[in-house]
Amino acid sequence: MKMRAVAVFTGMLTGVLSVTGLLSAGAYAAGGEGNMSASATETNARVFSLHLGATRVVYNPASSGETLTVINDQDYPMLVQSEVLSEDQKSPAPFVVTPPLFRLDGQQSSRLRIVRTGGEFPSDRESLQWICVKGIPPKEDDRWAEGKDGEKKADKVSLNVQLSVSSCIKLFVRPPAVKGRPDDVAGKVEWQRAGNRLKGVNPTPFYINLSTLTVGGKEVKEREYIAPFSSREYPLPAGASGKVQWKVITDYGGTSKQFEAELKG
């Protein structure tokens, strides 16, 4: 029997849950239908997820490519599948990741190379893409999925629960004309009251990725990024007034110093 269900996680993690039950002929003959003992049942649960060596990649269009480290923290091997998606996280982006599919043993790491293959990007601002890396479990008949002795286990009911997880991080295409870093100019963001909403206006060529955001000491929990030369609205906490304070995520995945401005409007 095989059952498949989709599991969705917070953040940029998605997974596909696969549950497979295997009844060997020997176990069936010994126990008979409906008479299988609990001791003859074996449950195996495995998560096929990968650890990435960065939380974002900054890509210079004039370069020959960028690299990303991928780590298998588990004690078992898995297949690694990678792709680059556009900002909408649906359509393919003009990049290739090599190798696109390979086996990575447990407690081992490898490097992915990301290379632009075409596409037109603005020269006066950053563009956002997504690098997605998925851990894939083996199929039942894959040789590397068998036991150490090369034999599949018999005389048991085997229930295999496998969760395949896809991890996506931001890839910022930063043209040579855009100098500096986001945390150099994050203090230029303007904050306005728009009814019961908080409006952030980004006059810079960088994506502003907020790490923290408060108004009068009250936390704004929804902190989506603000695109270059654009604005975004957030729910304004009830009764919030006074100064706006915020921090941004740096190129290295850290947190910047705190910025502060008056709430206008």
Image (cartoon, rainbow, N blue to C red):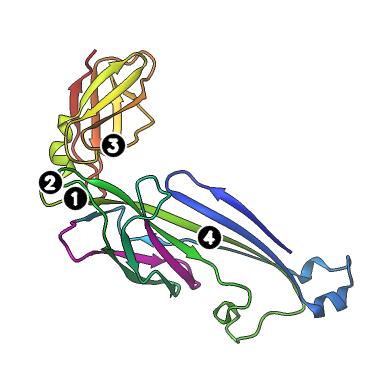
Describe the element under mark 3 as helix, strand or loop: strand
In the picture provided, is 162 more to the left or to the right than 82?
right
Q: Residues within 10 Å of mark 4 (few under 14, many from 20)?
A: many
Reading the chain from its start, which is encountered first: label 1 or label 3?
Answer: 1
- Residue nearer the viewer, 91 or 259: 91
What whole-number distance in Å separates the C-alpha atoms at marks 1 and 3? 18 Å
- Mark nearest the camera among 2 and 4 is 2
First of labels 4, 3 by sequence position: 4
Quadrant in the picture for residue 102: bottom left
Q: Nearer the viewer, mark 1 or mark 4?
A: 1
- What residue did someone put label 2 on? 178
Mark 2 touching mark 1, by CB under 8 A? yes
Residue 223 spot, x, y in % from top left: 34, 33
Q: Which residues are magenta?
A: 60-84
Q: CA distance from mark 2 to mark 4?
A: 38 Å
From the image, tell me which residue sits under label 1: 174
Label number found at residue 164: 4
